[in-house]
Amino acid sequence: MPVVREFRLPDLGEGLTGAEVVRWMVEVGDVIAVDQAVVEVETAKAVVEVPCPYGGVVTARYGEEGEEVAVGAPLVTVAVASEGGLPVAGPSGAGAGAGAAAGAAVAAEPAAGVERPLVGYGVAETAKGGRRRRVGSSAPGAVVMPVAVPVVAPVAAPVAVVPEVPVVVPVISPLVRRLAREQGVDLAALTGSGPDGLIMRADVERAVAAGVAAPVAAAVAAVAPAAAAAASPSAVAAEGVVPLRGLRRAVAEKLSRSHREIPAATCWVDADATGLMALRRQLNAAPGPKVSVLALLARICTVALARFPELNSSVTEDGSGIVRHSAVHLGFAAQGERGLVVPVVRDAQARSTEQLGEELGRLTESARNGSLTLAELTGGTFTLNNYGVFGVDGSTPILNHPEAAMLGVGRIVAKPWVHEGELAVREVTQLSFTFDHRVCDGGTAGGFLRFVADCVEQPGMLLRQL
């Protein structure tokens, strides 16, 4: 006997509480395979595709594109055949809380434990003995339609009709539903000409030609002018409000927490980057991968942090201690299709300048096409912020909580500069350094920034540190 399995949004990691639906990859009525991706969601960290552990026919989807679904809330329901039915099956030991029923029959199954989690996902906590859901019953935000599923043996006895269960309109195609909605046709009043009484597009078109319109359309037309007239000034003023969702909301929360909890201070200095740019030209004149300015700055940061290790740290959650990090996981600001993100180069201190350049390039490209993973966006211990790409000279950035420091680099531009006692045109940049005043005092922060500036002006100094 075919049954309906309810697949809920799993915990996608990092203790996230929900995700925003970006794009549905299946329609109601589609046949899917086990572990096929059914929806693309945006978490606070990245856009990911979510696979469904059941194979069968999609009978319902929960949540429209742009809506947020909580972890543990239903995503889709799938009609899965039992033994002898369709050649599809969910995971062994299908979980508690799964709904049971298919077509016109209702079959209940006892709970058999906790669902097998998807690969890489945790198991969200759910209440034991969850409610069963019948096909045909509706839930807020769900699109439910009956699906014809082959049954091995005939039904022995008719199933009692439950009066409170609403009648399900026999329509599979979402295009037919949309056409009916746009034309104001009441699908419940139509008799389908398709198999098993399914309502087809031709049925809706005939109803439109005959002038059979749903009373809802007339009601909407009558209420609309009154609603517009009664609109309050506050509602009109709110038309331009853009809700904070997904990455934007996560960034807002993190920056607000950083600004609220961390006593940050910023110092800055101008530096003559002519020597650094000359070194880059020399390196790129040799065969092999090209070295970017960002890669050279990353190398300077790792050397500076080895000299001032207290800045590669973070304060504990309760504020009672400072955690010193042995590895430098270097975050850097990158512009992606979802906005500004901070990918992380793992173990930057153990990479050569050429390896740093390759990894920075790979992560930058992933940021542009929106393919960064959660692991590539978390765990940073220090951030390098190159805001010179925006054509600006300086900034006082907010720290990337819970990190304790961030180096900012402005644009490198030709300016008049006193060099060896004479006025000359040199390539100058402004360096700014923001730090958590709890982990160090101004002397340490100033020493770090001065060392970085010296390496920018005289990159040969790096040889003494390598």
Image: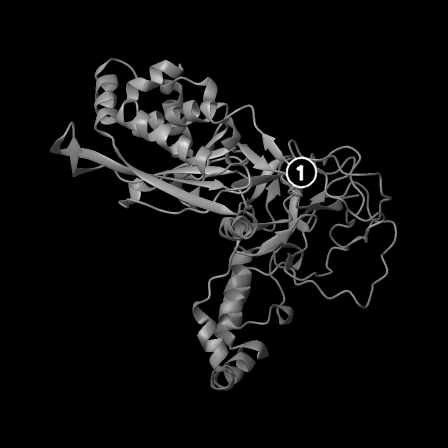
Q: Is residue 297 above or below residue 249?
A: above
Residue 448: x %, y % from top left: 41, 31
Residue 321 or residue 366, whichever sits in front: 321
User: Residue drawn at (70%, 60%), measured in percent from left and top?
Assistant: 139
Q: Taking 3 as reference, is 36 above or below it?
A: above
| Position above or below: 241 against 13 | below
Q: Is residue 156 left or right of residue 171?
A: right
Percent x, y of residue 174: 55, 57
The foreground one among 133 and 352 is 352
Numbered disc total: 1
* Front-most of residues 25 and 426: 426
Dot 1 corresponds to which residue? 55
Left or right: 357, with 256 as reference point = left
In which quadrant will I find the N terminus?
Answer: top right
Residue 440 screen position, x and y as percent = 51, 36
Judging depth in this view, the residue of 432 and 122 nearest the camera is 432
Amino acid at the residue labelled 1 = Gly
Residue visible at 29% across and 21% down in the picture? 459
What colouring does the structure picture have?
one colour
Q: In the figure, residue 121 lies in which quadrant?
A: top right
Residue at 44% x, 40% y: name it: 370
In the rendered image, the quadrant that contains the C terminus is top left
Q: Secondary structure at mark 1?
A: loop
Q: Residue at x 79, y 39 (%)?
A: 114
The quadrant in which residue 334 appears is top left
Query: How many residues crowd around disc 1 within 10 Å: few (fewer than 14), some, or many (20 or more)?
Result: many
Residue 22 visible in the picture: no
Q: Is residue 395 visible?
A: yes
